[in-house]
Image: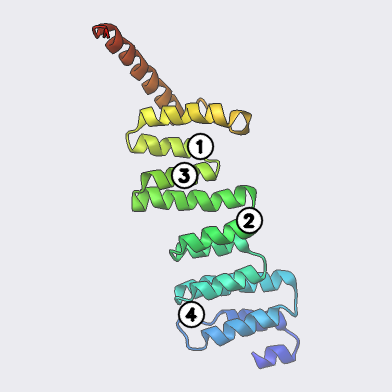
Amino acid sequence: MSRLVSVGNLEGAVSLLLSTSPESSYFYPNALRAVALSSTVSKSLVELAVKVVAANMVRSDRSLSGTHLLCSVGRYQEACSQLQDAGFWTDSATLAATHLNGSDYARVLQRWAGHIVHTEHNFWRGVILYVAAGAFEEAISVFQKFDQPETAAIFIMACQETLAESWSIDIDNENVMAVTECYALYQRKLVHQCMDSPPFFY
């Protein structure tokens, strides 16, 4: 490595340092050397070095250290993904809320919501996160998954009344159509029950 540096082949030196196995005792010091050396070459090289080092740190149980490196070069989306991969869901959401906007922020919330629904089986918390991310159709699919079509229909009506033009939903979406049909059937049954019931007099 020293010879590569001495002849000015800094990119080659960085590549050699990055090739150190995560299982090696030299991995961490070589990773830091690679990042430091790449910063003297170009911004693109230092970002590449940080991404490689951060990915390898996950394999060596140094996820948080890798996250710090990603944040240092402004790669917040990847840092959030790495935190989620390591199981630090709340930390990832906090980082996203601080540094991400729009679809990037929504993507982090949606992945967290999916984890909560499918892994933790927490119905309402998952729905809340989907709504926070603006993923209304995904929220409806959760209602469907947990066999709550009436609740899904009420959810759609509530969004229409309270959010007005600030929300959008694909009416041709399979889950939306299923909810609409189910709710229409529910209303028809309710009407028949009311008509078949004797009146109450006070």
**Residue assigned mark 2:** 100
Secondary structure beneath disc 4?
loop
Query: Spatial distance from mark 3 to mark 2, Cα to Cα?
Result: 19 Å
Residue at position x 54%, y 45% from top? Answer: 133
> What amino acid type is highlighted by mark number 2?
Leu
Q: Please tell me the numbered disc located at residue 136.
A: 1
Specify how the rendered protein is coloured: rainbow
In the depicted structure, whether residue 74 falls above or below residue 103: below
Q: Earlier in the sequence, mark 3 or mark 1?
A: 3
Secondary structure beneath disc 1?
helix
Q: Earlier in the sequence, mark 3 or mark 4?
A: 4
In percent of width and height, residue 146 lies at 33, 38
Query: Spatial distance from mark 4 to mark 2, Cα to Cα?
Result: 30 Å
Query: Spatial distance from mark 4 to mark 1, Cα to Cα?
Result: 41 Å
Residue at position x 60%, y 28% from top? Answer: 164
Residue at position x 48%, y 76% from top? Answer: 62
130 or 66, nearer to the observer = 130
Secondary structure beneath disc 2?
loop
Give the side of residue 121 with respect to residue 96, left or right.
left
